Amino acid sequence: MKYLLFSGSFRTESLNKKLISEVDKILSKESSNQIVTADLRSLSIPVYDGDIESKGIPDGVSQLGEMIKSAEAIIIASPEYNGSIAGPLKNTIDWVSRLRPVPFEGKPILLMGASPGGFGAIRSLSFTKVPLESLGCYIFPQTFALPKAHEAFSENGQLIEGPLKTKLSEVLKKFKMFAERF
């Protein structure tokens, strides 16, 4: 299966980027999987503005759109900003929605989040789901929330062995079965 992974955070030491890295490691254990990871910061997607769009879709948006089109399944890790969707992620979704045909349409998506708080970004995931569903995505009903994420990773950035790592692997297996239906 060809996966596209990305974090909704730009921050270099983002907990969600670490989570995506862990997902990459787990999925890479299966040789039939192809993994593409997008770094939203490096795509230089500007804040959505109709005036910018009238001059043409930015290259970074087109690049991400192509990555989404070629993916069979998408995994997004979203931080939680003030109990809601992260601005960079919402902006990215808004820009990609301007492409025709809409690349997200018909794509199975797994949402996950990591945060230093006790909820593991779970509140942001419910808000992230809304625009993606309106674009025709198939959202996997189970999410993965990593609470107290600042304590969940080792010094080298790997998820510490234990129940959360086991749960992540289980969610990824179930998501693959879900995604194979589309």
Image (tube, rainbow, N blue to C red):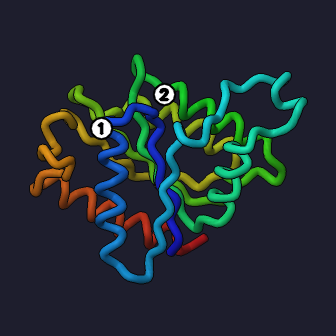
Q: Residue furthest right?
A: 54
SS at circle 2 = loop
Q: Residue furthest top?
A: 82
Relative height, residue 129 to residue 116 (above, below): below
What residue lies at 31% left-to-right and 48% top-to-bottom?
19
Left or right: 31 in relation to 166: right
Residue 70, quarter of picture: bottom right
Residue behind mark 1: 15
Relative height, residue 91 to residue 40 (above, below): above
**Mark before the other along the chain sequence, 2 or 1:** 1
* Marker disc for residue 81: none
Image location of residue 100, percent across then percent down = 83, 50
Residue behind mark 2: 86
Q: Amino acid at mark 1?
A: Leu
SS at circle 1 = helix
What residue lies at 44% left-to-right and 37% top-to-bottom?
125
Q: Between 69 and 129, which is closer to the camera in this rendering? A: 69
Image location of residue 68, percent across then percent down = 63, 57
The label nearer to you, 2 versus 1, is: 1
Q: Residues within 10 Å of mark 2 (few under 14, many from 20)?
A: many
Q: Between 8 and 52, which is closer to the camera in this rendering? A: 52
What residue lies at 40% left-to-right and 17% top-to-bottom?
82
Left or right: 46 in relation to 100: left
Q: Amino acid at mark 2?
A: Ala
Q: Between 160 and 38, which is closer to the camera in this rendering? A: 38
Relative height, residue 6 to residue 117 (above, below): below
Left or right: 53 in relation to 21: right
In what quadrant of the picture does the C terminus appear? bottom right
Image location of residue 121, percent across then percent down = 34, 32
